[in-house]
Image: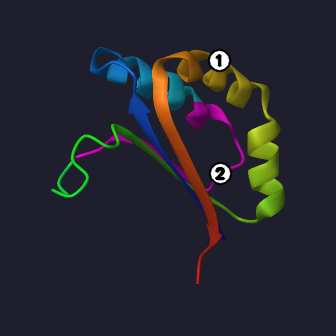
Amino acid sequence: MIRHVVFFSAKDKADVDTIVEGLSILKTIPYSDHFEVSYNLNADELSVDAVDVVVYAEFANEHKLDAYKAHPTYQESIARVRPIRELRLAADFKAN
């Protein structure tokens, strides 16, 4: 299984809800086994306000992750979110 984690911050905090909405359309892409978009709780005092939104997904294999990233809805999400986000930091890793 591949775990996919992406962190986002907004250029303007007023746009955080719009970022969540733009990322939430990714849930409609059929290749993930599990998919979440959530607001960061900012519970870690060392990184408060560094990340506004977290995407977490699980994929059976790298082929499904690749298919997810190639899906037209993925491109639509990028078009909505990229202009209003500051940070995008992603990690894909194999679960033990």
Q: Is residue 71 above or below residue 96?
A: above
From the viewer's side, name the closer residue of 58 and 47: 47
| Residue drawn at the location 33% of the way across and 18% of the way down | 12
- Tag 2: amino acid: Ser
For label 2, the SS is: loop
The magenta stretch spans residue 35: yes
- Compare residues 30 and 67 and report the one nearer the observer: 67
Give the color scheme: rainbow, by chain, secondary structure or one colour.
rainbow
Residue 46: horizontal and vertical position, in percent?
A: 21, 58
For discs 2 and 1, the disc positioned in front in the rendered view: 1
Residue 33 percent across, percent down from the top left? 61, 56
Instruction: Say how many tags the image has.
Output: 2
Which label sits on residue 32? 2
Amino acid beneath label 1: Ala
| Magenta residues (range) | 26-41
Residue in the image at 44% along x and 24% along y:
19
N-term mark: 2 or 1: 2
